[in-house]
Amino acid sequence: MPSTDPSQSSESHTPHPEIGNLLMMTDRYTNEEWAAQIAETQKKVVVNKDVVHPRPAIGSREFAETIDHTLLKLDATPSQIDALCSEARTEGFKSVCVRLPYVSRCVSNLKGSPVVVACVVGFHEGTHDTYSKLQEAKAAVDAGAAELDIVINHSILTQASQSQSSSGNATTTESLTASNTAANSKPFSGSPPPAIGPYSIPESDTTGEVIPDYSGIYKELASLRSLCPSPTVLKLILETSQLTPPQILACAHLAAAANFDFIKTSTGFNGRGASLEDIQLMSAAAQYLSTKTKSNDGSPVRARKMQVKASGGIRGLDDAVRMLEAGATRLGSSSGLWIMQESRERGGKESERRPGATRLYTDDSAY
């Protein structure tokens, strides 16, 4: 498998009035080359649903640090944002996750605290053009955000199946055929032949296949990584409710190639939230993409393993524990106070300071 290190991609400097001298990545692979690499990932990733991943002890400080305390409603008020920060500081959450207009306010509120500020980019549709995402990312980092949760343009992977189903035609910026989508909506039953894996696209279904614009997705992700280098943490929101397992694996492959730190399930605003199957598949993909083995020709896509963030529909301790044991290392939730109260009670670590009635206790929606 050829190296997909973004540092080996071509670069071009493109002046932009809002961003300045933008380093725009160009692609060193054709869509056909990307498709071949991604097909290897789809073929070789196998999920072992019996694996229970280690997690922090319930009620511990480390358990609290798995939570990104989230408020992304468009009608959020300054007082609610202040309460979000106070709760995160008190509970010891990893971050608060907010929209761009509230980043600087959160940074000010959390000064002197280990809690960092995460900002969403391209939220929630993901279909914003690349320059808009770059502009938003730069503004967030300039305002003090340490982490960015970026929505992938998942429509590139999904629109073609719908279009091709009705017209029989598609362009290279579109996606897998409808037959591929149907064929890969679930693993094959029984033991697959050695040449394929449970998420492979059967050869019989690839005749006339239109390759999605993998190159366009990669260039956007690599440009964001170039603009916001480490230690800024980049999480790629896949919107798994809208994708088939092979498409999820394609996103994971491109995120790893672009050197992202996390792959994340959902925005919470489009379809269902995280599922155990999503987390298990994404965790298995992250492991495969970072491991030197004979099965990937000894050439991992990314030497450091990506982490997995579960987001959407995590409203209590049982939800949180299931996601962590399935392979997530971070949880995005607006119900962090409920989760921590339950964890202290169940873990026998009920503190003298119990959270009182707040915005989050009277608001049971996802975000």
Image (cartoon, rainbow, N blue to C red):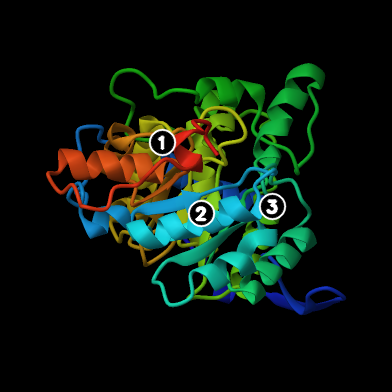
Dot 3: few (<14), some (14–19), or many (≥20) neighbours within 10 Å?
A: many
Q: Earlier in the sequence, mark 3 or mark 2?
A: 2
Q: Which image quadrant for residue 88?
A: bottom left
Specify whether residue 45 is in view: no
- Residue drawn at x 58%, y 25% is 181
| The label number, if any, that marks residue 29 in the structure image | none
Specify whether residue 165 is in view: yes
Task: Name the residue furthest left.
Answer: 348
Please tell me whether mark 1 or mark 2 is closer to you in this view.
2
The amino acid on which the numbered mark 3 sits, given as a three-letter code, is Gly
The amino acid on which the numbered mark 2 sits, given as a three-letter code, is Ala
Q: Rounded to the nearest whole Å, what is the CA distance between mark 3 and mark 2?
A: 25 Å
Q: Rounded to the nearest whole Å, what is the CA distance between mark 1 and mark 2?
A: 20 Å
Q: Position of residue 139 (x, y in %)?
A: 70, 70
Q: Reply above or below: 322 against 144.
A: above
Identify residue for label 1.
314
Dot 1: few (<14), some (14–19), or many (≥20) neighbours within 10 Å?
A: many
Q: Position of residue 220 (x, y in %)?
A: 68, 60
Q: Rounded to the nearest whole Å, what is the CA distance between mark 1 and mark 3?
A: 22 Å
- Which is nearer the eye, 284 or 266? 266
Identify residue for label 3.
122
The amino acid on which the numbered mark 1 sits, given as a three-letter code, is Ile
- Which is nearer the eye, 276 or 207? 276
- Residue drawn at x 60%, y 73% is 228
Under circle 2, the secondary element is helix
Q: Quadrant of the N terminus?
A: bottom left
Under circle 3, the secondary element is loop
| The label number, if any, that marks residue 83 in the structure image | 2
